[in-house]
Image (tube, rainbow, N blue to C red):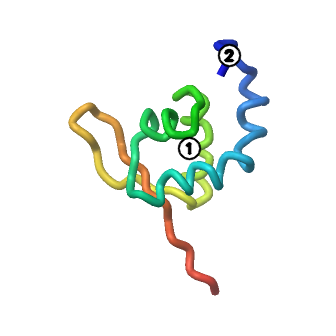
């Protein structure tokens, strides 16, 4: 990114666009927010908004707590009803 701090509303609006990118990153296994941020090329504080939104709606869940105090998040496999 270019270093500017974006408005929270602007970041939140991108959640739907980022969902597939984040789920694609998690195909290789659970990752922390900093690991996800590095993989998608966005700052951690923006990725945290998207991860928490995805968690709220059941797309992600916590997997394990690292020694550094970060949770690893994994994709939730939703089965068709």
The residue positioned 67% from the left and 46% from the top of the image is: 18
Question: Disc 1 versus disc 2: distance between alpha carbons?
Answer: 24 Å
Q: Is residue 70 left or right of residue 37?
A: left
Q: Is residue 40 left or right of residue 65?
A: right
Residue with the most extreme left position: 67
Local SS, label 2: loop
Residue 68: percent from left, percent from top: 26, 31
Residue 63: percent from left, percent from top: 35, 55
Residue 45: percent from left, percent from top: 56, 27
The residue positioned 57% from the left and 39% from the top of the image is: 40
Residue 37: percent from left, percent from top: 51, 35
User: 48 or 1, which lies in front?
Assistant: 1
Q: Is residue 59 left or right of residue 34?
A: right
The residue positioned 62% from the left and 57% from the top of the image is: 57
Q: Earlier in the sequence, mark 1 or mark 2?
A: 2
Residue contact at pointers 1 and 2, CB within 8 angstroms: no
Number of dots carrying numbers: 2
Residue 23's label in the rendered image is: none
Q: Which residue is mark 1?
A: 52
Viewer-nearest of discs 1 and 2: 2
Q: Is residue 54 left or right of residue 77?
A: right
The residue positioned 64% from the left and 13% from the top of the image is: 3
**Category of crowding for the residue at label 2, using alpha-carbon neighbours closer than 10 angstroms: few (below 14), some (14–19), many (at least 20):** few
User: 40 or 50, which lies in front?
Assistant: 40
Q: Which residue is mark 2?
A: 2
Local SS, label 1: helix
């Amino acid at each position: 990114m270019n270093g500017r701090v974006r408005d929270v509303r602007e970041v939140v609006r991108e959640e739907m666009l980022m969902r597939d990118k984040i789920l694609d990153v998690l195909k290789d296994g659970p990752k922390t927010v900093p690991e996800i941020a590095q993989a998608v090329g966005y700052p951690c504080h923006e990725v945290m908004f998207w991860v928490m939104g995805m968690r709220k709606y059941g797309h992600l869940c916590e997997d394990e707590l690292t020694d550094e105090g970060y949770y690893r998040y994994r994709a939730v496999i939703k089965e068709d009803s």
